[in-house]
């Protein structure tokens, strides 16, 4: 059996309660830690990576819209 960190437990618990079973990281989790946690969950077959449905992808679109364009 896989030992889970507190962060992994929080993510899986929230995904179990989500209407579509989507897993989301805590807002305060830094990007490097988020990637490590999700890679571990996927590697241990506790999550499956999918493309998020458009209605659940709002945060990524808003973040991308705020990024500055390439410098010329």
Image (cartoon, grey):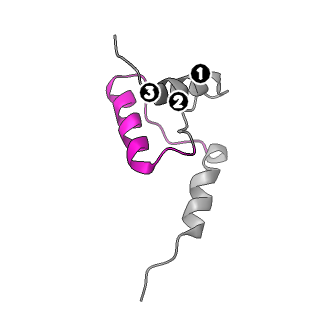
Disc 2 or disc 3, which is closer to the eye?
Answer: 2
- At a point 43% along the width and 84% down the height, the residue shown is 71
Return the residue at label 3.
47
Give the spatial CA distance, label 1 vs label 2: 9 Å
Please tell me which residue lies in front, 39 or 57.
Answer: 39
Dot 2 or dot 3: first in sequence order is 2
Where, by quadrant of the figure, is residue 43 drawn? top left
Q: CA distance from mark 3 to mark 1?
A: 11 Å
Q: Is residue 52 left or right of residue 35?
A: right
Q: Which badge, 1 or 2, is on the more N-terminal residue?
A: 2
Which secondary structure, mark 1? Answer: helix
Q: Quadrant of residue 19?
A: top right
Which residue position is annotated with label 1?
A: 16
Q: CA distance from mark 2 to mark 3?
A: 10 Å
Residue at image point 41% right, 89% down = 72
* Residues in magenta, as a range: 27-53
Q: Residues within 10 Å of mark 3 (few under 14, many from 20)?
A: some
Circle 2: element type: helix
Q: Are marks 3 and 1 in contact (CB under 8 Å)?
A: no
Q: Which quadrant of the figure contains the N terminus?
A: top left
Q: Which residue is mark 2?
A: 11
Q: Position of residue 18 (x, y in %)?
A: 65, 27
Q: Residues within 10 Å of mark 2 (few under 14, many from 20)?
A: some
39 in the magenta segment: yes
Identify the residue at the far bottom of this view. 72
Q: Residues within 10 Å of mark 1 (few under 14, many from 20)?
A: few
Nearest the eye: 32 or 19: 32
| Towards the viewer: 6 or 57 | 6
Asked if residue 56 is positioned above or below residue 58 in the image, the reply reads above
């Amino acid at each position: 059996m896989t030992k889970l960190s507190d962060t992994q437990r929080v993510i899986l618990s929230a995904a179990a309660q989500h209407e579509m079973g989507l897993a989301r990281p805590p807002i305060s989790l830094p990007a490097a830690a988020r990637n490590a946690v999700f890679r571990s969950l996927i590697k241990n077959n506790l999550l499956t990576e999918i493309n998020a449905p458009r209605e659940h992808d709002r945060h990524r679109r808003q973040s991308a819209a705020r990024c500055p364009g390439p410098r010329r």
